[in-house]
Amino acid sequence: MTNEVLVTGGAGFIGSHLVDALMARGNEVVVLDNLSSGALENLAKWLDNSNFRFVRGDLLKPSDVDDVLDGYDVVFHLAANPEVRVGSVSPNVHFQQNVVATYNLLEALRRRSDVEALVFTSSSTVYGEAETPTREDYALLKPISVYGASKLACEALICAYAHSYGFRAVIHRLANVVGPRSEHGVIVDFVRKLGENPKRLEILGDGTQKKSYLYVTDCVEALLSGLDGALDRVEVFNVGSEDQVDVLTIVRIVAEEMDLADVKFRLTGGVDGGRGWVGDVKNMLLGISKLKKLGWKPKHGSAESIRLTVREMLSKTPNAKRRV
């Protein structure tokens, strides 16, 4: 990979871990982030480094993109609204922050000839309810959430722009990524709820939702491996662990790590056949053979990734109950 790199959304959860890896590799890194879901604290150790620069800007403002997009060999595009559930009540959020933001970035790339590659973090939700393990060539793609639809729309735009305007595109469809600095998702919800009431926990859905979870450092290694190994003009890689856990297993792991033995669980029953919310995919497991052929494989399974994430969260919360 060449040296000068731009990371949109680089102050966020996955983005900041990617910045850590890029800086460790000796890249010159610029982060563009509006700090709507990210935090400068995630980048604190790099703020005084001469190879790093932070720019506060918004992809919904084309002038912000034009001001920063100059002279980079690779652009990692991670800026997006990460909350899947918000699309069921406010679909315009995902349209604006995913689709329009990506379009504005692509338009800026079109006006320049020096960008070699765009790396995009898409989502397993583009598949909808697919056969598992789901391969990258699975068809038809039928997302059941606005979030998934917005990510698929971004993929289509990126594919067309890459072929039309001469840069490479590497699309990574991510499973559920967990780890330090995460601020949303089922693990965060369970730890917060049990911190407030260690005797009782409400669980959305029927508890049988079964998905793959990937530790964030494994995810970052996959993003870099995909970029280094991509051969086609547009390359698509699945990124996930090779196993699954259901919601009740997650609850048990969280309770064990918080040293809670007598928690009473209340399942809401969910919607539309036991989903946690409208658009929730009940069964997700990605086939990752393409990345494995490049030499990447996850170092952590789903349960271990969840357990490590809970321990990290509890270590940052001095008053939370946890195992000693």
Image: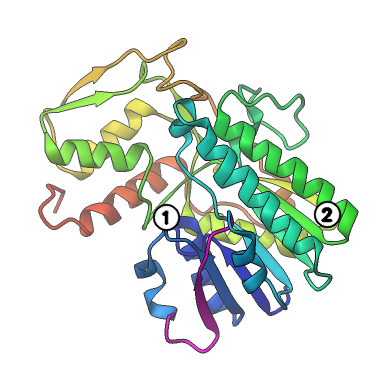
Q: As drawn, is 39 to the left or to the right of 49?
A: left
Residue 220 in view in this figure: yes
In the rendered image, residue 64 lying in the magenta stretch gets the answer no
Q: How is the image coloured?
A: rainbow
Secondary structure found at label 2:
helix
The range drawn in magenta is: 47-59
- Can you tell which quarter of the image residue 193 is in? top left
Residue 246 is situated, as x and y percent measured from the top left of the image, at 41, 27
Check disc 2 and give the amino acid type. Ala
Which secondary structure type mostly characterizes the magenta part of the structure? loop
CA gap between label 1 and label 2 equals: 28 Å
How packed mark 2 is, by other alpha carbons closer than 10 Å (few <14, some 14-19, many 20 or more), is many
From the viewer's perspective, is residue 296 above or below residue 310?
Answer: below
Dot 1 surroundings within 10 Å: few (below 14), some, or many (20 or more)?
Answer: few
The reply to whether dot 1 and dot 2 touch (C-beta < 8 Å) is no
Residue that appears at 47% across and 87% down: 49
In the rendered image, which residue does mark 1 sit on? Answer: 36
Q: Is residue 56 magenta?
A: yes
Point out residue 136 in the picture as x, y percentages from the top left corner.
73, 37
User: At 44% from the left edge and 23% from the top edge, which residue is drawn?
Assistant: 209
Residue 240 showing in the rendered view: no
Foreground disc of the pair 1, 2: 1
Q: Secondary structure at mark 1?
A: loop
Q: Is residue 130 above or below residue 306?
A: above
Identify which residue, 89 or 314, lies in the foreground. 89
User: Which of the two residues, 33 or 184, is positioned nearer the viewer here?
Assistant: 33
Quadrant assignment for the N terminus: bottom right
Q: Give amino acid for label 1.
A: Ser
In the image, is 236 to the left or to the right of 174? right
Q: Which residue is mark 2?
A: 162
